[in-house]
Image (cartoon, rainbow, N blue to C red):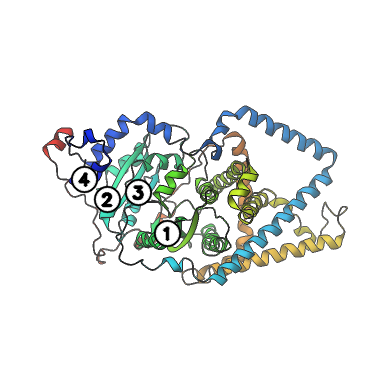
Amino acid sequence: MPFPEARAAIRPHLPPELHDARTLWASRAAIQDRIATAFRPALSAAMVARVPEAESCRRWGRDRRARLAAVLALVVAIVAVSAFWPRAVLAVLAGWAVVTLVVAAAFKTAAFVARLAGGPVGAARAEPAGDAPLPRVSVLVPLFRETEIVHALVARLSRLTYPKCVLEVILVLEEADAQTRDALAAIDLPSWMRVVAVPDGAPRTKPRAMNYALDFCEGDIIGIYDAEDAPDPDQITQVARGFQSAPADVVCLQGILDYYNPRQNWLARCFTIEYAAWFRLILPGLARLGFAIPLGGTTLFFRRDALERLGGWDAHNVTEDADLGFRLARHGMRTEMLATVTREEANCLPRPWIKQRSRWLKGYMTTYLVHMRRPRLLRRQLGTRAFLGFQAHFLTTVSQVLLAPLLWSFWLVLLGLPHPLDPVLPRGAMVGLGVLFLAVEAINLTIHATAVSGEGHRHLLPWAPSMHLYTPLAAVAAYKALYELVLKPFFWDKTRHGLSLPAVRPEVLRRPAATPAPAGEPVLRRPPEPRSAATAELA
């Protein structure tokens, strides 16, 4: 045990014959290393299979030949039908694209109106809930090849004002990632930060790493940050008080994600506008309408007992956050938005953007297929309204990016040019479709402009109309995602971080020397750990 209080806490849980057992005092690091070594096989097996198989996609790895055969047969059938009836196939695909466009626009509009009518995000959770003791919080920060950003990460997390006696930040590393481990070894981490190394294995994914680290957490609340995150200093205090005042069925609080490099280039500006609309308008609106919501990958906080009952994260799903959001809803649990902001790095180069977006879309496809294995059970668990919302969200998202080229073709009509479907539809109907597309663009522009009309984002207003030129990148990512869904379903196409570090203002990365540290904030020096004779002997 690392301290005397632990003995009194654990004694009631020991069998009678161990009540008088001798205690060996050891450092937390020594205990963690001993457990990781002694139980390595069991922990390694558990982290890939915590989620029940019926709610996981891991069985896909065993059905590769059948999956490839089915996909090949489908492709051959589509090519054959298209060869004989090309115009009919085009009409069917275009019709589905139009239907999903209308549903997506209606879905977003309903969420937008509900958000504007409902007041500020998370207002009911912003106030402290009396003088109740603060719970212990464990924050997981998965890292993989993040040598460029670990110094900035430690500096940002050191601004958190939550009492460090009830906070632990666990930096989750892959065992094979010697570069990041060496970079962290050069930093004198504060005593409330520690490293957990995940045994090497497959699939090498973020959810697998978090499943492993979950067994080493001590908190009653489990949080997630990404390597490039810069959370509000009082964020965890808001989370703790939010859970204390929330109903028991609220087991997850999702913060607002934003970007700290929106001025870097056009791609970063558009990404910031997209996130502002999603996290400040659409997600809160969907939650107020009673729909289950897909979670973001960071600034998520869970009641630990609920997270463990669900089996943690699906280690094989590359969009584990969206999957977990709907698994929570299926089991009668709720997620609420919280008005606290974490700033991230906007992907500002086309290739990394496409790689990241393709992983998200592949995860969306995977999540939909997993949850739709038993659609009747899903409808019964979610309820009819949330079930329809699930269909509207996933089907429209995937369909719109895959069929985007067909939708773009209708701009030919507005330009007075011939269209391949002219022999199928009268010209009046074609013009009507063109007007419909203009109306949808007007809705999107309204949502994007509203999202960035507040203080801090107003400089992005002139760029809102350019979002129409931003969406074609998603179509490229969608076809990459479709290819990987068939051939590499568990491949984690890692997002590269640190691209904006030279462009970010210095005060975002570190506090100026003239600014005093907030009261109670530790400096980045590890205090000497008291060592008993037994501890020294163990070391």
Mark 4 vs mark 2, foreground winner is 4
Q: Residue at x 42, y 34 (%)?
A: 46
70 lies left or right of 536:
right
- On the picture, is 432 further left or further right than 152? right
Instruction: Name the residue beneath numbered marker 3.
Output: 150
Residue ID for mark 4: 8
Q: Disc 4 or 2, which lies upstream in sequence?
A: 4
Badge 1 vs badge 2, beta-carbon distance below 8 Å: no
Disc assigned to residue 342: 1
Mark 4 residue type: Ala
Q: Disc count in the image?
A: 4
Tell me the amino acid under the disc marked 2. Answer: Trp
Q: Nearer the observer, disc 4 or disc 3?
A: 4
Question: Would residue 447 appear left or right of 46 to someone viewing this image?
Answer: right
Can you say which quadrant of the picture contains the C terminus? top left
Q: Which residue is mark 2?
A: 192
Secondary structure at badge 1 equals strand
Distance in Å between CA atoms under marks 4 and 2:
22 Å
Q: Residue at x 54, y 67 (%)?
A: 451
Q: Earlier in the sequence, mark 2 or mark 3?
A: 3
Instruction: Using the rendered view, name the quadrant where residue 55 is placed.
Output: top right
Q: Residue at x 69, y 52 (%)?
A: 404
Mark 1: amino acid = Thr
Query: Sequence-wise, which precedes: disc 4 or disc 3?
Result: 4
Expressed as whole percent of the image width and height from the top left, the position of residue 500 reads 43, 55
Kind of residue at badge 3: Val
